[in-house]
């Protein structure tokens, strides 16, 4: 039997998003009648389905925790948001016990399937694969990128596009037997004329970017001279209004240059964690990721996925809070 955890700070909420696989958040207000109506049903779900470090139920008072409410665009109460590995995957607005129960029991079923059947050792999930654990205190904020504005220079058109890098699915190359299934669509990108790639990522809101995860599922065969390489040197630029040209980048000092060592790549998930100088990535509206070279002599570079971790800022003003449903006795 577990009661919902009442959130007392942004840091506490961020920690729970990191340490618990699933988090259910009830955004409520003391003055909200519908919030009071559905509270017993929510507490019953919490007592039945809470599991340590797997499914955690929380209550967020929007008047006391306005920063958290703004971060997730909560403007009406009650609002229930379900998180998986720190990312919001479903939202229920209003005092609708059936919709809330359906959403919560669906995630409980998903958690049970993972416990009984997934022994792969990676962090695959139904919504948002990541190649390594999220850094403590921070969330996967990859979904904050603006898909229509993403650009990728020097990609080989026989492979994926810029949007491929942000797909929520597990890379096909990490499926059984370590290679993509025959006939499956290509879900990675490779460079074209040389080993360099230039990626421009605009965001929907201002972010604090803590770190990146880069996945590159290259061939393990040393005899294949034409096999693409994993990235080695990566230069990062912030708050540019457009993608940088390769010559343009040569004349602009990067905010940070990172060298990925061979031992940084996880053997099971082909993923390297790239820690950033957090103080230099506090108010980020766009990110340019310049893959300068690779770890080898090939003229091709391969990247399967990119994940971004940190804190999401405001998407819009909180505005006037409102309640959803009829206030009893009014």
Image (cartoon, rainbow, N blue to C red):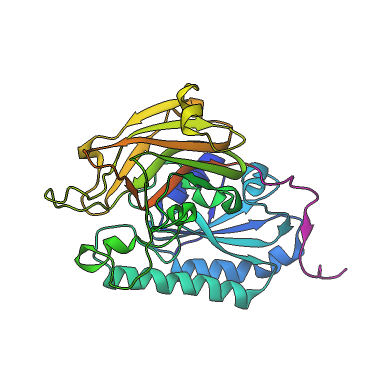
Closer to the camera, 228 or 96? 228
Foreground of the two, 181 or 269:
181
On whether residue 125 falls in the magenta region, the answer is no
Residue 206 relative to residue 55: left or right? right
Could you tell me residue 123's position as x and y percent? Answer: 33, 57
Q: Main secondary structure of the magenta part?
A: loop
Q: Residue at x 43, y 71 (%)?
A: 108
Q: Quadrant of the C terminus?
A: bottom right
Residue 135 showing in the rendered view: no
Q: Is residue 229 left or right of 41 when viewed as pictured?
A: left
Quadrant in the picture for residue 78 = bottom right
**Relative image position of residue 308 (x, y in whole percent):** 46, 44
Outermost residue toward the right in this view: 330
- What residue span does the magenta drawing correspond to? 314-330
Q: Quadrant of residue 282?
A: top right
The N terminus - image quarter:
bottom left
Q: Position of residue 31 (x, y in %)?
A: 77, 56
Look at 47% across and 28% down and name the residue there: 247
Image spot of residue 72 (x, y percent) = 62, 51
Q: Is residue 120 left or right of residue 307?
A: left
Does residue 205 appear left or right of residue 281 in this picture?
A: right
Q: Furthest-left residue in view?
A: 223
User: Which sits in the foreground, 163 or 117?
Assistant: 163
Q: Residue at x 59, y 48 (%)?
A: 149
Magenta-drawn stretch contains 318? yes
Residue 327 shows in this picture: yes
**Relative to 330, is 23 above or below?**
above
């Amino acid at each position: 039997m577990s009661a919902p955890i009442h959130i007392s700070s942004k840091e506490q909420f961020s920690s729970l998003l990191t340490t618990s696989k699933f988090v259910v958040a009830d955004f409520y207000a003391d003055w909200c009648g519908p919030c009071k109506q559905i509270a017993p049903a929510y507490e019953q779900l919490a007592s039945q389905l809470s599991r340590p470090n797997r499914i955690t139920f929380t209550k967020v008072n929007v008047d006391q925790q306005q920063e958290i409410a703004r971060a997730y665009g909560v403007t009406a109460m009650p609002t229930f948001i379900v998180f998986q590995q720190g990312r919001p995957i479903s939202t229920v607005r209003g005092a609708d016990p059936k919709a809330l129960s359906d959403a919560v029991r669906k995630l409980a079923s998903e958690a049970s399937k993972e416990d009984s059947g997934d022994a792969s050792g990676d962090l695959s999930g139904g919504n948002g694969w990541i190649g390594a654990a999220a850094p403590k205190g921070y969330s996967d904020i990859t979904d904050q990128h603006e898909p229509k504005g993403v650009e990728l220079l020097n990609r080989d058109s026989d492979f994926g596009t810029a949007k491929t890098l942000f797909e929520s699915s597990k890379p096909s190359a990490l499926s059984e037997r370590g290679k993509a299934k025959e006939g499956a669509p290509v879900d990675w990108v490779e460079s074209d004329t040389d080993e360099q790639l230039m990626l421009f990522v605009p965001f929907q809101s201002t972010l604090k970017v803590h770190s990146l995860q880069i996945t590159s599922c290259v061939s393990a065969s040393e005899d294949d001279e034409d096999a693409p390489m994993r990235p080695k040197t990566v230069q990062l630029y912030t708050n540019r209004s457009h993608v940088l040209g390769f010559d343009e980048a040569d004349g602009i000092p990067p905010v940070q240059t990172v060298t990925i060592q061979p031992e940084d790549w996880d053997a099971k998930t082909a993923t390297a964690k790239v820690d950033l100088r957090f103080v230099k990535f506090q108010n980020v509206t766009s990110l340019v990721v310049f893959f300068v070279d690779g770890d080898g002599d090939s003229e091709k570079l391969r990247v399967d996925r990119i994940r971004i971790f940190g804190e999401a800022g405001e998407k819009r003003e909180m505005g006037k809070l409102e309640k959803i449903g009829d206030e009893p006795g009014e």
